[in-house]
Amino acid sequence: MPSLFSTSSASAGTENQTRSFSRVNSLKRDWSEPEPAASSLKAAPVEFQWTDSPQDKPKMPSTVTVESAADRRRKAILAAMSPNTSSPSGSTSSKSSLKEPPVQQLPSLPSASSAGPSVLNGSSMSSLGSDLKKRAMPWEEDQSTTKKAMLQRPNSRNSARSNSNKSTKSGGVMDIRQKIVLSTEQQKVLSLVVAEGKNIFFTGSAGTGKSVLLREIIKSLRKKYVTTPDAVAIAASTGIAACNIGGVTLHSFGGVGLAVDKPDVLLQKLRMNKKAAARWQRTKVLIVDEISMVDGDLFDRFCKLGQMIRKNQKPWGGIQVIVTGDFFQLPPVTKNNQQPKFCFEAVTWDETISMSVNLTKVFRQKDQRFVDMLNEMRFGRLTPESIKAFQSLSRQVKYDDGIEPTELFPRREDVDRSNAHRLEALLTDGYTYAASDTGTITDPIQRQKVLSNFLAVEQLSLRVDAQVMLIKNMDETLVNGSMGKVIGFCHKQLYFTDTAGRWLPDGPDGDDMDETIREKLEKTRKLVESKIAGAPNPVVQFKVPGGGMRDVLVEMDQFKVELPNGEVQASRTQLPLILAWAMSIHKSQGQTLDRVKVNLGKVFEKGQAYVALSRATSLEGLEVIGFNASKVMAHQKVAVWSRKLRDLND
Ligand SMILES: Nc1ncnc2c1ncn2[C@@H]1O[C@H](COP(=O)(O)OP(=O)(O)OP(=O)(O)O)[C@@H](O)[C@H]1O
């Protein structure tokens, strides 16, 4: 399901917040320019280090409401160069390590809400935000936000640069409203869960909006239990899935380690773990995502454990249980090739789940033929026509906007190798951004394990032209899964855009700008560049729905694993980007991708081929190498069991 991460104003950090960036070089490059000669760009890596406070959190580059054209821009530029601008406390030099964050109060706009000309207020990444604001959890985000862009500037020199944003209106105001309205069946499930308090399992093939619905459910339950927030526990089968919904793994929720013992032994363990025992007592609703990967025996053990610790004979001790996932996707991990035991095979499944709902409307793919082919594949029964159709997808698809299909691999090593290889081949300028990690888990091995589940990586190397994917929802058009290319690096204070939201790498310098402003602007630029040269942010040109592109200055964000009581077990502050020439099938579960390439020759697990191919939104955007019907495997017992499922129209 789509990855969704939580963001908060402060982390329960226990660790030093040192962040380092190694700078390879810094330049911007227009996509249309020829690649710079390698020789001119090979600077020795330079290390920059500074500390920042844990509550630091930059706002994502916000687009703003337009005030008026020239006046507005003039006002903002002047504000950007206002005397309250102070220079950094110390310059970041090569290999320097700063004890205090370099205070950088460069250009600020008239007000935060009118951050228009993108000479944005406050600190750079070097002082990552005393202005750290609590950003809404994914399910708290307003689904109908309208973003309006930017500084009015009709004669932008960059206006010719791939200015294809179809959502830009003539007045220079970009209305990118895109509303998701729950379908009738999604609404019914929401009501059954929230209003009627039913224990529900909702499923559906890939792309039927299970994640979208889950987000709404979480949002509504949080409202319902607003006075007791820890009444709603959010968990998932795997660390990656848990990170995707801002929850914890089911094991972590349980608080009894691997939970392989009998329930009475687990009860003793739980009583020793006071925090976990209290959690079980306080939980009123438990959400479990990606249920297909939860082992059936674990489901039974936790059901009994709930009864015992809560002294209540109802399943799970009376906790309302909501589970979702698709059993045709990835199964529970087993040892020595043993047959997995699915949750629907658990003894307590039927008594726990009062209603199973099968969502039927597929949103991800519009083409019914493709939907049918995927459904055949889901059940592992392809018709000769579908086999032919899949085989015909072995052609190479060319795109003219420079964004290539993401190649999905079953193994992580292949992903890392492929991305590293592509990055090295670029020979353009770039930076490496190191994450800063905190959290309450002190055991380094355990902690590393949890952190490795974040999509956000420990070290992110980017170069101009690198293909990246956004791994957080920012707004309606910039969502987890949005693909883009790095088009340059820029300090937040020097980030200017035109009316259409296009980045102006050289700043606003239209014909109507007077000399004094131009000179002041140049001075500001030099000051910023000389003082905080180590920390420019990447500027990414993202592809947005409808075929347009959107430039965004990407800033650090926080990813965390949080227990229902708000305890942050692990958190990572990193740019919400990953290299996206390649991705693992495991991590792709939940993603919606317009351009996908899959080599099925390497697929080894039942459900893997289905997960991989069903990420694609269309047959046109799907490239399949080595298609072999025998690779399209489904667990027979899932197929048999699923026949019992009813949709809400039955
Ligand atoms: N009610 C809706 N209206 C419009 N679009 C929707 C709706 N529900 C889901 N979508 C869109 O459909 C796509 C797939 O949704 P989602 O990821 O929630 O499906 P899923 O069932 O969780 O898929 P998977 O099982 O493959 O992870 C997303 O792009 C999502 O925005």
Image (cartoon, rainbow, N blue to C red):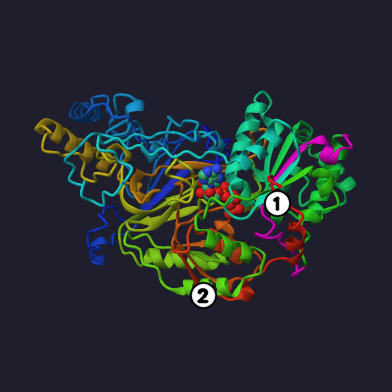
Which is nearer the N-term, disc 2 or disc 1? 1
**Proximity of marks 2 and 1: CB atoms separated by less than 8 Å:** no
Looking at the rendered structure, the secondary structure element under dot 1 is: helix
Q: Nearer the viewer, residue 586 or 260?
A: 586
Residue 291, disc: 1
Q: Which residue is mark 2?
A: 391
Q: Is residue 77 visible?
A: yes
Residue drawn 79% across the image and 52% down it: 298
Q: Position of residue 543 (x, y in %)?
A: 37, 51
Image position of 169 (left or right of 202): left
Q: Position of residue 128 (x, y in %)?
A: 42, 37
State the extent of the magenta-drawn residues as a range. 311-338
Q: Between tags 2 and 1, which lies in front?
A: 2
Residue drawn 13% across the image and 35% down it: 519
Residue furthest out toward the front: 650
Looking at the rendered structure, the secondary structure element under dot 2 is: helix
Which class describes the residues within 10 Å of circle 2: few (<14), some (14-19), or many (20+)?
some
Quarter residue 395 falls in? bottom left
Mark 2 to mark 1 CA distance (whole Å): 31 Å
Q: Report the predominant secondary structure element of the magenta stretch.
A: loop
Which class describes the residues within 10 Å of circle 1: few (<14), some (14-19), or many (20+)?
many
Image position of 18 (left or right of 332): left
Q: Position of residue 148 (x, y in %)?
A: 34, 34
